[in-house]
Image (cartoon, rainbow, N blue to C red):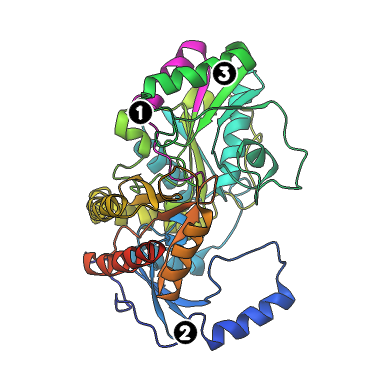
């Protein structure tokens, strides 16, 4: 795929990882950076292009994490760089709430057009996914006059106070940081690998709805917040029918459905948004990560009557919709269209899913392989059981990192290895990186 990569797209190691310069920087970091900010791999990046990261020691690593699903268009995508660079020279900030500018409006127009549904929409821009989620809940509560919010087991929605309350996993996200925002309730998610055998999406939805009706009551519920495919929770793909049944119940009871598409959006799963797969049309959609090719930007998009229910000045923020980030987003969206990145994600997904399915068949340590598009994962277990094996996931990730392939772990139990390659990754480079992963998994089985 011609994505304009300016660095050779091949894995190349010239030192051990981390190399001497990275180790030097890690020493400096220990004296300057708070320990609560951790890194998956202490290899310090100097530049990047396409799907390759080049570290300060000259090593070229294959990035199968995309900065956690951020650079779907590839690192330093040409149109992102061009538009952002040009904007930096013209205007870096005025605050849209003081003096507005066209790029903010243009990004909102794009979000209104691309997100699921043909109804009239409005958008507002923010800085991060957590901000988007917090504001979606604020908007839902204001528009409905209700207070309660439902999230799901295994959910991840961010690190701010309300987002932590919505997030299911305690460590490292919530431990010691309470108390959290009130009126947050949790329902069981459809998790096919760990649900009772044969449970359908409709049955999983009925199970969740029964919990909501008994513990919350529809008349008290402002919104249900759900990731169409859970990210940090383990790349959990709900059974077919779960999301449509949930959406139908919400519509029947005047409850707003908030789709957290922060990790799944912008072509990652093979559609523009993961909700498109089953034709689910949420009332509100939160976006971030892949929207701006690496610059911080987030959005909430929703039905016009819901978004416009909030009084003037009720939502916003000093940096929200920064002009440089907005121009980067317009460049990223142009790239997605020109390179047909939804189709690219489907091609990547077919390759990766095939290799992971083979791993599941051959390795007793791989309990499940799952995903959609360029969002794929394996869940590692103790052989012969479904017992999570977080140590195995760490071992696989560490071996991949040692050999110059960046992968990420996730999951409620820490036992999932997830793959989020840039959608522009060359097939030969992807195959090489997958060979490294297969070898790392094989080492588990002796």
Q: Which mark is residue 414?
A: none
The residue where tag 1 is placed is 117
Q: Tell me the mark number nearer the camera, choosing from 2 and 1.
A: 2
Q: What's the CA distance linking mark 3 and mark 2?
A: 52 Å
Q: Residue at x 32, y 34 (%)?
A: 276
Q: Position of residue 78 (x, y in %)?
A: 34, 67
Q: Which is nearer the eye, 310 or 144?
A: 144
When the figure is inspected, residue 403 is found, relative to residue 153, above or below; the finding is below
The answer to whether residue 244 is seen in the rendering is no
Q: Which residues are magenta?
A: 232-257
Q: Earlier in the sequence, mark 2 or mark 1?
A: 2
Element under disc 2 = loop
Q: Earlier in the sequence, mark 3 or mark 2?
A: 2
The residue where tag 3 is placed is 211
Magenta stretch contains residue 407? no
Element under disc 1 = loop
Magenta stretch contains residue 251? yes
Neighbour tally class for label 1: few under 14, some 14-19, many 20 plus, Cα within 10 Å: some
When the figure is inspected, residue 209 is found, relative to residue 301, above or below; the finding is above
Q: Which is nearer the eye, 345 or 133?
A: 345
Is there CB contact under 8 Å for labels 2 and 1? no
């Amino acid at each position: 795929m011609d994505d304009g990569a300016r660095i050779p797209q091949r894995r190349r190691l010239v030192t051990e990882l981390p190399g001497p310069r990275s180790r030097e920087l890690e020493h400096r970091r220990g004296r300057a950076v708070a320990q609560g900010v951790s890194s998956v791999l202490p290899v310090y990046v100097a530049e990047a292009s396409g799907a390759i990261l080049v570290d300060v020691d000259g090593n070229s690593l294959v990035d199968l994490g995309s900065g956690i699903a951020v650079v779907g268009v590839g690192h330093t995508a040409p149109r992102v760089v061009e538009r952002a660079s040009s904007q930096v020279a013209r205007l870096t900030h005025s605050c849209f709430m003081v003096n507005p500018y066209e790029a903010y409006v243009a990004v909102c127009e794009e979000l209104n057009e691309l997100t699921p549904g043909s109804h009239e929409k409005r958008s507002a821009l923010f800085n991060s996914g957590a901000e988007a989620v917090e504001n979606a809940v604020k908007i839902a509560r204001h528009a409905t006059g209700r207070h309660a919010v439902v999230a799901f087991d295994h959910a991840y929605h961010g690190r701010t106070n309300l987002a932590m309350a919505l997030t299911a996993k305690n460590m490292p996200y919530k431990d010691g940081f309470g108390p959290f925002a009130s009126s947050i309730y949790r329902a069981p998610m459809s998790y096919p690998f760990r649900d009772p055998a044969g449970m359908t999406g409709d049955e999983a939805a009925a199970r969740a709805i029964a919990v909501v009706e008994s513990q919350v009551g529809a008349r008290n519920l402002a919104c249900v917040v759900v990731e169409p495919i859970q990210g940090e929770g383990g790349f959990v793909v709900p059974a077919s029918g779960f999301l449509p049944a949930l959406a139908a119940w919400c519509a029947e009871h005047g409850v707003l459905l908030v789709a957290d598409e922060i990790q799944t959006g912008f072509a990652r799963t093979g559609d523009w948004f993961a909700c498109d797969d089953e034709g689910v049309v949420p009332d509100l959609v939160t976006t971030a990560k892949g929207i701006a090719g690496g610059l911080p930007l987030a959005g909430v998009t929703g039905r016009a009557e819901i978004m416009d229910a909030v009084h003037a000045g009720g939502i916003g923020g000093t940096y929200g919709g920064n002009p440089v980030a907005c121009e980067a987003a317009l460049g990223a969206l142009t790239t997605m269209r020109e390179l047909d990145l939804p189709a690219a994600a489907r091609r990547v997904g077919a390759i990766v899913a095939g290799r992971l399915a083979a791993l599941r068949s051959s390795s007793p340590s791989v309990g499940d392989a799952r995903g959609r598009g360029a969002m794929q994962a394996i869940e590692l277990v103790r052989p012969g059981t479904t017992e999570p094996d977080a140590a195995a996931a760490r071992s696989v990730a560490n071996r991949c990192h040692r050999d110059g392939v960046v992968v990420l772990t996730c999951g409620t139990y820490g036992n999932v290895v997830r793959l989020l390659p840039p959608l522009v990754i060359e097939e030969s480079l992807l195959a090489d990186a997958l060979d490294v992963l297969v070898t790392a998994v094989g080492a588990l089985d002796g």
